[in-house]
Image (spheres, grey):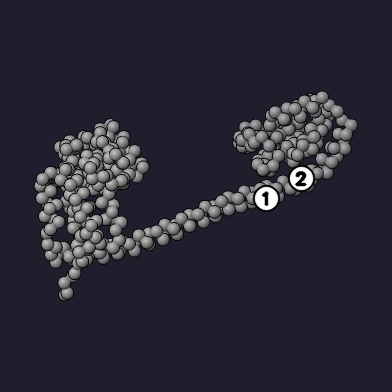
Amino acid sequence: MAEAYLSTDEENYVRMCLLITGVSPRGVRALFDSEFAPICLGASIKKEYSFTKLKELKSKHIINQSQWNLLFPRFPDVPDSKAFDVTLMITLLRNLTPMTPPACGYDILPPTIEVTPGADLARIKHYRNFLAHLDDGKIDIALFTAAWTDIAGAITRLGGQILKEECDQLRTIHLDQTNQEIMMDIKLSNDEIKLLKESLENLKSSHNEMKKSHEEVKKSYVLLEQKVATTQQDAIAGNVRAQFSKVLEQWKYKGKKFESTQAYYVLKLLQEKSSVIITASSIEGETITLQHVACQMHTDGYSILLVKDPGDIVKHYNPNQKTLFVIDVSNQTEINFRDPVFDRIRDILEDKQTKRIVVCR
């Protein structure tokens, strides 16, 4: 098998990956363990303030479920910083300790003169993100030199002299066949990741389009459902209106010469209330009052529906139309006001467009 060949820029990339993924986590962990003593890490995490803050970070998806499981493992396991990745440790240090943040925040590479622990965490975070988004697996010598100095300095300040020596060795150590094979695997993985990212973006785009289409279909369905319901209600009530139209004309004719203080009073009540009941031992005058009121309400834009039973109100109710239900139960001996239909009628009469006038003995 022919020996794999790496260019200088590719070797720079390999060394940077080994520095960031192999050495920098131990530097961050050294700082983390100094802030959260390993022997009482679980207790520190479960403190009221810490737990509340962690729940907030999880709700904002800053901490994912896998990281949450590391923080709160199943009994009898306990949390161990050795299992924490760099991102989780930096998140905990940022949010659960009084550490001073970098002058420009954690999302911007700090200047070289800023050497606080917070600034060093921001450096490591910056270069981890840089490598994660580098598609060609190459770093030129100028960038490599500057970045290595920056990262190695941060690791040394966080982890001490031993880690500095590892950084120095890693910069000059010969990359043997094993390292080169690792590099080739990394390159292949990067190509696959790039393709996966493109596929993911396409899937996201398709998903958003499907979601948008689904919302449009859902809206159309709701509108259609409302239209069908209204059409059905209009069709049901249409026969009633057709039969009642002649009756209404007769009432209008009879009412031309009719004037009644009671009719005006009932009209005023209907403007304020949803339901009026007219009762009397003799129904002749009350019936004329009802007819006069119905004609006036029709003039005011109300659809007048004559129903024989309170249940017809539920049957013919149309929320999109001003309606006056006229109920003449003067000839009925009994009405069961405990019937469940009256619960529904009470709900319907909450609609300010729906009125009811009843004549009874």
Q: Residue at x 36, y 41 (%)?
A: 59
Give the secondary structure at mark 2: helix
Residue 177 is left or right of residue 243, and the answer is left
Q: CA distance from mark 2 to mark 1?
A: 14 Å
Residue closest to the eye, 139 or 111: 111
- Percent coordinates x, y for residue 166 in the rendering: 12, 52
Q: Residue at x 61, y 52 (%)?
A: 224
Which kind of residue does numbered mark 1 sit on? Thr
Which kind of residue does numbered mark 2 sit on? Arg
- Percent coordinates x, y for residue 65 in the rendering: 30, 46
Which badge, 2 or 1, comes first in the chain's sequence? 1
Q: How many marks?
A: 2
Residue 349 is left or right of residue 186, and the answer is right
Residue 78 visible in the current orientation: no
Question: Would you identify the image quadrant in which residue 76 lies?
Answer: top left
Eye-nearest disc, 2 or 1: 1
Q: Residue at x 22, y 63 (%)?
A: 10
Question: Would you identify the image quadrant in which residue 354 lies?
Answer: top right
Residue at numbered disc 2: 241
Classed neighbour count for the residue bearing mark 2: other residues with Cα under 10 Å, few (<14), some (14–19), many (≥20): some
The residue at the far bottom in this view is 1
Q: Residue at x 73, y 37 (%)?
A: 324
Residue 116 visible in the current orientation: yes
Residue 29 is left or right of residue 310, and the answer is left
Question: Would you identify the image quadrant in which residue 344 lies?
Answer: top right
Quarter holding the C terminus is: top right
Classed neighbour count for the residue bearing mark 1: other residues with Cα under 10 Å, few (<14), some (14–19), many (≥20): some
Query: Which disc, if any, is residue 231?
Result: 1
Residue closest to the eye, 155 or 264: 155
| Looking at the image, residue 111 lies above or below residue 275 | below
Give the secondary structure at mark 1: helix
Residue closest to the eye, 341 or 256: 256
